[in-house]
Amino acid sequence: MALEFACQRVGVTDCNHTATAESKDELLASVAEHAKDAHGVELNDTLIDYALTTVREV
């Protein structure tokens, strides 16, 4: 089962980006790249922990 992250689930309501991956590590790499490129945000441990609470299995 794949994992899915959506910016809107963490409060970034003006971004429709979703990331899907087969593993947590792949998902986090994708989310980190998007956060940096699209939002200018470097993920730290606190942001990663919060993001993981919103991940869904799809």
Image (cartoon, rainbow, N blue to C red):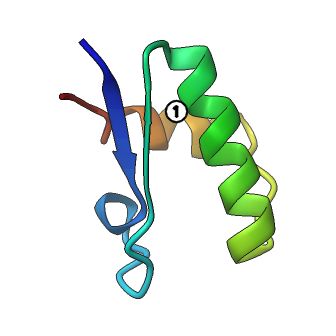
Residue drawn 43% across the image and 75% down it: 12
Q: Quadrant of residue 53?
A: top left
Vertical position of residue 10 compared to residue 23: above or below: below
**Other-residue count near label 1 (Cα within 10 Å), few / some / many at <14 / 14–19 / ≥20:** few
Question: Residue 42: horizontal and vertical position, in percent?
Answer: 81, 55
Vertical position of residue 21 compared to residue 14: above or below: above
Question: In the visual, does 37 lie left or right of 29?
Answer: right
Question: Residue 13: horizontal and vertical position, in percent?
Answer: 35, 82
Work out which residue is located at the far left of the displayed protein and give it.
Answer: 58
- Which quadrant of the rendered structure holds the C terminus? top left
Q: Amino acid at mark 1?
A: Asp
Question: In the visual, does 35 lie left or right of 22?
Answer: right
Vertical position of residue 45 compared to residue 17: above or below: above
Residue drawn 76% across the image and 65% down it: 41
- Choose between 19 and 28: the one closer to the eye: 19
Residue drawn 54% across the image and 29% down it: 27
Residue that numbered label 1 is attached to? 49
